[in-house]
Image: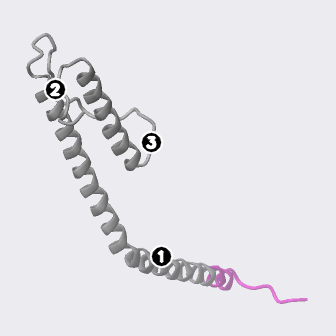
Amino acid sequence: MSDPISATERYKEIAGWLDEAVGRLREQDREKVAELTARLPETQRLVDEAAARERATRAGVRTHWEAVVEDLFHERWMAMTPLPRPNESVPQHELNYYDAEVGRTYEELVEAMRKRSIIPRRRGE
């Protein structure tokens, strides 16, 4: 029959297991910190690129809006409003999709204004 161990020895045994487990967790944490630290510069670069792309997109939308307002300025019956705020309830798509959609709808609007002789046709049309 095995010798019964004392409560003190059992406590030390359990505390040893816990110490080993904490050591393993700390090592895993160090590895994860190293991995995330290595990924941080690339992630920051991607965030910076996205912010620059957002600024460029907003500037493009503002330019299109200002061009339409300028083209319609002489249409006194039409109330011109400031550039609307972005509609954030639309489905998510890549920014390229929305850039293309802004360009497409702008061109459709310009063409509709030309057909109605609101703005003059381009030379050669």
User: Nearer the observer, disc 3 or disc 1?
Assistant: 3
Q: Give the CA separation, mark 2 to mark 3.
A: 36 Å
Circle 2 or circle 1, nearest the eye: 2
Dividing the picture into quadrants, the one containing residue 93 is top left
Asked whether the beta carbons under mark 2 and mark 1 sit within 8 Å of each other, the answer is no
Quarter assignment of residue 16: bottom right
Q: Which residues are magenta?
A: 1-14
The disc placed on residue 88 is none
Label 1 amino acid? Lys
**Image: 69 above or below 124:** above
The kind of residue tagged 3 is Gln
In the rendered image, which residue does mark 3 sit on? 92
Q: Which x, y percent locates residue 6?
A: 71, 84
Give the x, y percent position of residue 115.
27, 21
Q: Nearer the viewer, residue 125 or 105?
A: 125
Q: Residue at x 11, y 29 (%)?
A: 70
Colour pattern = one colour
Picture coordinates of residue 113, whole percent (x, y)? 24, 23
Image marks 2 and 3: residues in contact by CB distance under 8 Å: no
Disc 1 target residue:
32
Rounded to the nearest angstrom, the CA distance separating label 2 from label 1 is 63 Å
Q: Counting other residues with Cα less than 10 Å from the Cα at mark 1, is it few (<14), some (14-19), or many (20 or more)?
A: few
- Work out how far the residue at label 3 is from the one at label 1, CA to CA, in angstroms: 31 Å
SS at mark 1? Answer: helix
